[in-house]
Amino acid sequence: MTTFTRRVFSGVQPTGHLHLGNYLGAIKRFAELQKTHECIYCVVDLHAITVPASVWGGPKELANATRQVTAAFVAAGIDPVKSILFNQSQVCAHAELTWILNCVARLGWLNRMTQFKEKAGKDRENASIGLYDYPVLMAADILAYLGTHVPVGDDQKQHLELARDIAVKFNNDFSESIAAHGFGDQFFPVTEPLITGPATRVMSLRDGTKKMSKSDPSDYSRINLTDDADQIALKFRRAKTDPEPLPGDVDGLKQRPEADNLVGLYAALSDMSREAVLRDYGGAQFSAFKPALAELAVAKLAPIAADMRRLLADPGHIDAILADGAERAGAIADKTMAGVKDVVGFVRAR
């Protein structure tokens, strides 16, 4: 069995304003994973342009959003020296490997991707090929670095399954060539998901059945990472709840999506379990719990927001971080692509 370096790869799209869901569901975990894994984190700007420019905002907004995501990564504790932090479009291997994997992936596999159906809606004929092929690009993102682990939310689990299927099929299709070139019994690892912690899925403050989203027209549905203390307090004060007090145990949160969401947010921000939160606040009214949650959120997010503002004031420094990360990422991806080309049978310069 081929042994691979334990390497985490993950990315965040540079679209809209980053919010509490992005922080708890992804960025906070990214910082923690640096302690145990070799980590590569990517601002996936190629993925951003798979939808109309009216969604991602056009060239100026894309550049600004790319720098904002990078600033959030660094402000939240991702070390760009210890980890690799870069934007996808600076490493051409992502696009190049996507084409090769397109020739491995099957049409039927992509036709089963539910996220394309959701994003394209009823007007699928006008959706871009890029949106349809998004999952293969995601597979290339991971496999270009021989990523062994990917921290994913529920909405990306199907895409990771596709990446695993593509890796297995490539390994099987080219098994003889892989062995002949000295790569052992498999070229690509079968990437494992990392889904941990109490707040993998953070819900809207206006509707506990919907995911917190950058695209929600109501700014009161989310806590932005750049919100100040007054905005955070106001949004939690206006957050939708039911009239009952908080229950004494987690079973009491069933069928109460807004209560469950707010308790989950407190748990994630305080690194407590839901059970521990309810031991402290069970029986309390939301009029007492919401201010405590707002105070906790401000304590956690205010330093990040301040550091983001400092970083964004010097875009040249952010661009230098991305360029350094792209050079280091490119060195890994280029080695992978050389191996892929040898295995497939492409003639290349030596």
Image (cartoon, rainbow, N blue to C red):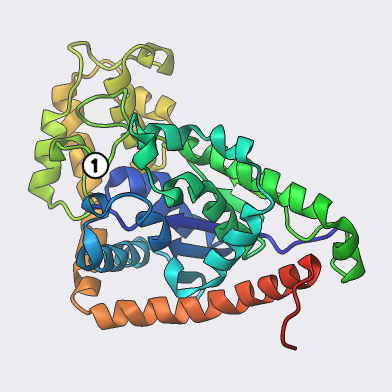
Q: Is residue 56 left or right of residue 233?
A: right
Above or below residue 277? Residue 34 is: below
Above or below residue 245? Residue 100 is: below
Q: Residue at x 71, y 64 (%)?
A: 5
Q: Is residue 132 left or right of residue 99?
A: left
Quadrant of the drawing holding the N terminus = bottom right
Quadrant of the drawing holding the C terminus = bottom right
Residue at the farthest bottom position: 350
**Residue 93, x across and y down, in percent:** 57, 70
Query: Hey, which quadrant is residue 56 in on the image?
Result: bottom left
Q: Residue at x 27, y 17 (%)?
A: 246
Above or below residue 197? Residue 227 is: below
Q: For the residue carrying disc 1, how many other residues have a C-alpha within 10 Å: few (<14), some (14-19), or many (20+)?
A: few
The local secondary structure at tag 1 comes to: loop
**Residue 265, x across and y down, in percent:** 32, 35
**Residue 76, x across and y down, in percent:** 35, 60
Residue at the farthest front position: 125
Q: Is residue 102 left or right of residue 296?
A: right
Q: Closer to the camera, 181 or 197?
A: 181
Amino acid tagged 1: Ser
> Which residue is disc 1 drawn over?
215
Q: Residue at x 26, y 60 (%)?
A: 304
